[in-house]
Amino acid sequence: MRSIKWIVAGLLIAATVAAGCSGSESTKKVTVISGATLFDGTGSEPIVNSMVVINGSEIDCVGKDGECSVPLGAEVVNAEGKYITPGIVDAHMHFFQTGFFDSRPDAMDITETYPFPEVAAYQKQNPQRYYNSYLCSGITGVYDVGGMSWSIDLQEEAENNPKAPHVAAAGPLITPVPGAPFDLPSDKVLVTLDSEETGIKTVQYLSALGSTGIKFWTFDEDSEEYMQRVQATAEEIRRQDNQMIAHATTLEQAKAALRNGTKLLVHSVQNTEIDEEFIELAKESGTYYNPTLIVSAGYMLAFRAAADIAPIPVTDPNGCIDSRTMELINTASQFKNHPRLSANMKNRLEAFNPETDMTREIPLTNLKKVYEAGIPIVVGTDAGNPGTLHGVSIFDELEAMQSAGIPAKDLIVMATRNGAESMRRDNDFGTLESGKFANLILLEKNPSEDISNMRTLSHVMLKGKMMNVSEIQDQ
Ligand SMILES: [Zn+2]
């Protein structure tokens, strides 16, 4: 890993004296990053030869070199030749999921080897390894859009943790289906919407816990009775000043979600191309569209690994993936004789090509249409699902979005400002502007030329603290 040069400007002793005179404000560490080409996350033209002044955890000034004054005693980071963007936001992930089937027994039941209650308890008690994976991948904000109610507690825990990205979390999901194999009797992921009262009380409870968003997992859109329950639930969401999130992958389900005021649509419409009505409904609701392009292929990759066809392909030069996850996926082939992996299934898995089959045509077409219609788009991986690993999968998702024809310079905005907006934290981060948290990343290559250059990440700054990404997981 290439290092960056640290210089201390002025006399340290002067800074110490000043701090002694003027109270605690001046004792904050001031860092200046100078010389980089900076993308501020708003979509404005990049600032060449930029300067960012960071006071404590916040940005004080962003401008061209010389536009901000450098306080005496400031630590100056010479970042000439490098690129800066705000920290990335993954607007769709799940802390209760491991990246393999142990947390998704509905897809392949391996609970004999990995008892689900133990997996779920471990996930609750050990989020730090994922915090590290996210920071290590340049991600300084994550939105957990569905899980057990403990995921809501992570919001505050992470906010107070100097080595955790900002977290927003929705908690349990509302659904027409009668529960899931990954529900524990004492801690559910899915709440079956069997009455209006169930919906209203669930919204009241999760909102009182502080949830960011209430997510609906699919709709029974042809049932008038069911949609009345949804409507009553959606009205309560608005009363609570919370926001509606929806997993709706068909055009009809997505429209049903939008008619009820969905603010975040967390999957592509996959069955057909979107139409004018969809676009109008999304604009009316002020909806953010999260295409989630790679997660389906991730399942195929995980099944292929389990079937001993090929290991899950991992690109992780900085060692961002934690050791437990690595062990889990490296031992995947112990399940090669699992009944789920029938001869038919194995044929399908053999035919899957990770080079060419990571995304499908309709989601790509729809993403381009949504983009051209001016609907705000966010970047979210659905990490935690089998084959979609926490942190590092962000780069695959960005590249898939680029392959739909989205310009890299716009992807930067989607992956930063828009993500922060979707998690209702845009007053705090998502763009590089004075008064916001100093969350940013340093890259070796220009991300606006090709979004793959996000992979040249060398450092991440979280709340004013600079970290070398190749060291984060080991600390
Ligand atoms: Zn998801």
Image: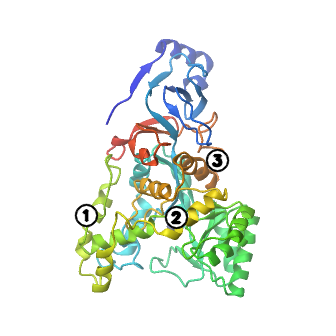
Q: Nearer the viewer, residue 100 or 381?
A: 381
| Identity of the residue drawn at 29% across and 81% down | 347
Residue located beneath label 3 in the image? 426
Q: Nearer the viewer, residue 296 or 139?
A: 296
State the mark number for residue 330: 1
SS at badge 1: helix
Amino acid marked by disc 1: Asn
Q: Residue 48 placed where, x, y %?
A: 53, 29
In this view, 100 is above or below 401: below
Direction from residue 137 to residue 378 in the image, left or right? right
Q: Disc 2, ligand 1: is the CB inside 8 Å?
A: no
Q: Residue 147 placed where, x, y %?
A: 51, 68
| Identity of the residue drawn at 71% across and 74% down | 233
Q: Nearer the viewer, residue 344 or 103?
A: 344
Direction from residue 348 to residue 47 in the image, left or right? right
Real-space Cα distance between discs 3 and 1?
38 Å
State the mark number for residue 364: 2
| Identity of the residue drawn at 60% across and 82% down | 176
Within the image, what quadrant is residue 341 found in?
Answer: bottom left
Amino acid marked by disc 3: Asp
Contact (CB < 8 A) between labels 3 and 2? Answer: no
Q: Residue 240 placed where, x, y %?
A: 73, 64
SS at badge 3: loop
